[in-house]
Amino acid sequence: MKKKLLYMVLGAVILCMSACGGQGEKGLETLTIGNQPYTQGIPIYLAEEQGLYEGLETESLIFVSGNTQNEALGADEWEVGVTGLPPAIFGGVSYGLKIIGFSVDDTVSPRFYVRPDSDILSVQGQVPGCPDIYGNADTWRGKKILCTTATSSHLMLVVTLEKLGLSEADVEIVHMDPSQALTAFKAGEGDVLACWPPIAYSVEEDWVMAASGVATGEQIPIVVVASEKALAEKRDVIKSWLRQYYQHCETMAGDWEKLAETLETMELDNGLTIDSEGARKIVEERPLPALEEQLELFAGEKGQTKADEIVMKYVDIFVAEGRISKEDRDALAAGGFLDNSLLLEIAQEQ
């Protein structure tokens, strides 16, 4: 039965699309894409809207949440896609999801704000290698931090605490969704607000960004993924799609007006709140990836690449937090959670 689904935060079904299959009505190989209404999803959205895919017939499910995206993966409803690193890790543990590339760099997104009277601001320059992180272990210890857990912001918060010589046990992390956290912080609750754009564009003018993903000097990517089943059954098709994804990224890169316009449309169509100015800021802060960068990150022996180093750092954070087990971590590593074979073949074929 053909169906097309648009997943919202609550998993509401909005429209119908074709289920994962082999060849479409045009005799082309088909792929069902798990897309998101964010910067990383723009090339997918425009490629379908403008008919840019060559030799492929694609249809997309759009997810505003990595959690609902993983639920659909468990039901075998999509084959390739883009998602945040935290849901990719959980998808790898639960459903055998594989990372086959990186998309936009999400490092710029996580931001940690304090009020102007915070004692964290009384100290700067005491974190080795991270001059833009305010405070030290003493000023951060015991702070109540409003943060959406199991997100890139949460992972970067843990990294920030590590840079300060602290751990999650040294602070109080209160889970709230981004909008709720912003409202609560404005009302005086908490000592630190963890957020990301566009919420970060709505903070009070006198709040100070005491730390950020960029300030840590680390990197956290949005990732390109494929289901284990799809890789086994449609490997060459996925390789073609992956190559075209990066080609489209490079073609569209720098067209800020079109990118911002598309991002605004995607987010509004999926029940999110954004304006033209915010959309423009987001696409400029999070540029689309280039293939050459990916080939460098994924070059090398399986399990020994720069990409593996980046991703497994955050896997280890989830192990330390007790969100996944050591056995889960070892299974990811042994099972090729990062599959660099497609990018290596693309490099050889250039």
Image (cartoon, rainbow, N blue to C red):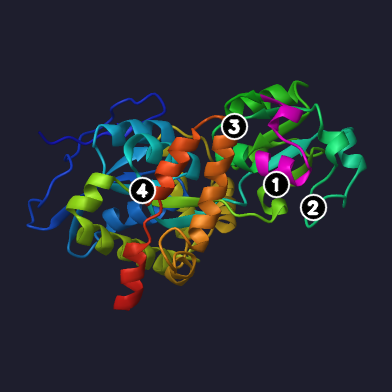
Among numbered discs 3 and 1, the one appearing first in the sequence: 1
Q: Amino acid at mark 2?
A: Asp
Residue wearing tag 1: 212
Q: Which mark is residue 335?
A: 4
Query: In the rendered structure, which disc, 4 or 3, sits on the residue that comes first in sequence?
Result: 3
Q: Left or right: where does residue 81 sit relative to residue 326?
A: left
Residue at 64% across / 54% down in the picture? 218
Q: Residues within 10 Å of mark 2 (few under 14, many from 20)?
A: some
Are the residues flagged by discs 3 and 1 in contact, CB closer than 8 Å?
A: no
Comparing 42 with 150, the one in front is 150
Q: Is residue 154 above or below residue 40?
A: above
Amino acid type of the residue that numbered disc 4 sits on in the rendered structure:
Gly
Q: Are marks 2 and 1 in contact (CB under 8 Å)?
A: yes
Q: Nearer the viewer, mark 4 or mark 1?
A: 4
Q: CA distance from mark 4 to mark 1?
A: 32 Å
Which residue was labeled with disc 3? 321
What SS does tag 1 mark? Answer: strand
